Image (spheres, rainbow, N blue to C red):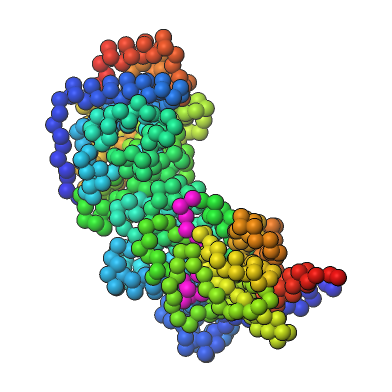
Amino acid sequence: MSQTNKYRAHPPAPGMAYMSAELKQTIDLTESTVTDDFDERSWDMVVSLGLSRQLTTGKTLIELAGEGHDDIVVCTADLGRPTQVIDFGKAYPERYFNFGIAERNMIGAAAGLATMGLTPVISNYSFFLALMGVENIRNDICYTHLPVKMVGTHSGIAMGFYGTSHHCCEDIGALRAIPNLILMAPCDGTALTSALRSQIKHPAPIYFRAGRGREAVVYDSPFDFRIGGSNTLREGRHATVLAIGNLVKASLDAHDILAREGIGLTVVDMYSIRPIDREPIRAAARRGPIISAEEANVTGGFGAAVAEVIVDEGLGVRLTKVGMPDAYSVLGPPTHLYRHYGLDGEGVAAAVRKALDAARPTA
Amino acid sequence: MPSRAVKNVPKELVKDKARLIRRETVRLTDICGSGHYGSAFSMAEIVAVLYYQLLHVDPGRPKWADRDRFTMGKGHAAIGLFPVLADQGFFPEAWLDSYSRMGSPLGDHPEMKKTPGIDFSSGSIGHNLSVSVGMALGARLNKSPARAVCLMGDGEQNEGQIWEAAMAASHYRLDNLVGIVDINGAGSDGVAQETLRSEPLKDKWQAFGWNVVVLEDGHDIDQTFDALNRALNAPNGKPTCVLAYTVAGKGVSFMEGTWQWHLGFLGPKDIARAYAEIDAGDIG
């Protein structure tokens, strides 16, 4: 097969931005340059951003400020639009600081703001926040134990074709090793809102690992986003998927796929990575094989955190880690990447089947 | 930004405090067996002028919201700050005797969670000017008269984050922020300007939108006071950088102007020589 044919074989990625009439209805196009005489498939940044509906940080912080949290200040590094905290900046310009493409300075300045009694919320692409800024997070925010809230967006392979340099698969491993840091992963916009609402006043540094904003919706109503908490979303008796982020929806899809085959799957949203909720892991171990699912490097990632609990507590259960392999990812449209790496419903279902087969006694 | 009152103290007192810094640096270094003499000696007059004449801090209320904030980008010189904080009453002087011992609050770098009077922890070179930017922004939001002062080293000017912070400070018109560069010329590997040249610093800071005050002799009390006082009260919508030309190891003849004493250890005989020279010295 020629290269050309190989690439043509892929259909256009579903969910890509097209300027259809329906879409136009739902997006604030005030700042868009795309007008009616444009091709209907044309789109600019405004349209693209309009699709990232799960990035609710800015909206939620405006609400919190309106409710009397006048200590909130928001910091970003030329990514206020993609992370959508710019909405906060429009509502409260004097409490919104764009530090330009200077992430380390942004993190240090946020620490300084925190020492003045303010509640800084940083939002940036997770690669530039968590991996470029890891040393500043460690020394300026965590060692000093300051109440800075960080929302790293576009984690994992969400940056897709922008390139492997922008893929953020090592952040869990890096951040999980930093004392004082609470690390949690809201899986959709409602979860992100719940996370900020529940934890804005928490006195410790917290890193929220968020997606690109185009995630499928998991939650229809806000909940108490607890440090060390989790939500069991489906209960089945054969196996358990412990999932975070994007993989929560994929695991719910896997539940439906497997239900048709008579396999009962428990699905837990393990949104608190550090500290981790141990009880669902113990319960899962009593049930059958455990599958961890994440959009991150399985080496040092969430799956490794689950493995630590299994070993620490001597649970003696088989763990299958679904996630990014310990290698640099290929680039491509995000949707294609999820399929390629088995980070979708089919991929998780296949991992569950395999785990069940391996667990079955061979007589 | 309203100016804050200056404490009128005799010049002799400030000189005495600079001597205290040097003596205690020698003594504490002897406790642990290694330390940054060169950097502590070069900043002695700057720290003495700041803490005894200019900064508004209150040892009885180390967390006073409106206090001026002092951070040390050159955190490795903390040994020269601890004696001042103890002398002012931020913590018992006996703490100094524990310097560097197991579990001591006092080590080679300042730690805000352990030591009253330390406004921010440091250790990674190049971080604290950014922190001070945040402090100055926060003071403005809080409508506080607090000013943020960050003491940096000349080698520290090699760090890219310094210039990120410099851009942010002028962009946000932080005239309640003062940067001080202690230009003592010494680094771990040799003469700072030979390791990686950062001069011309005046042009650089001006180009980044800062007022620049050149302090030609950072060991002259009057000059140091004038420069720092001007910097702390420059309400022109710009941050101010004081380029303080100093001498590494100032006050002890065999250390003066040498990079070799940036980090080191004196044996008993040389400790006695150092004390004698510090006591006899009339710097300032």
The magenta stretch is A179-192
Q: Which residue is depicted at the point 50% across and 79% down?
A: A219
Q: Say whether residue A22 is left or right of residue B266.
A: right
Quarter of the figure with residue A362: bottom right
How many numbered marks does the figure carry?
0
Taking the image as drawn, is residue A44 in sight? no
- Against A216, is A120 above or below? above
- Against A120, is A268 above or below? below
Q: Is residue A187 magenta?
A: yes
Image location of residue B264, percent across then percent down: 46, 22
Q: Say whether residue A69 is left or right of residue A122.
A: left
**Front position in the image: B180 or A293:** A293
Taking the image as drawn, is residue A363 in sight? yes
Q: Say whether residue B197 is left or right of residue A334.
A: left
Q: Which residue is depicted at the point 41% across and 20% down?
A: B30
Quarter of the figure with residue B206: top left
Q: Which residue is depicted at the point 29% across and 39% down?
A: B117
Q: Which residue is depicted at the point 52% across and 73% down?
A: A231
The residue lying furthest to the bottom in this view is: A21
- Against A108, is A123 above or below? below
Quarter of the figure with residue A10: bottom right
Q: Is residue A67 magenta?
A: no
Work out which quarter of the rendered image holds the C terminus of chain B and state it: top left
Image location of residue A27, percent across then percent down: 46, 83
Image location of residue A151, percent across then percent down: 46, 63
**Front position in the image: B273 or A206:** A206
Image location of residue A37, percent across then percent down: 52, 87
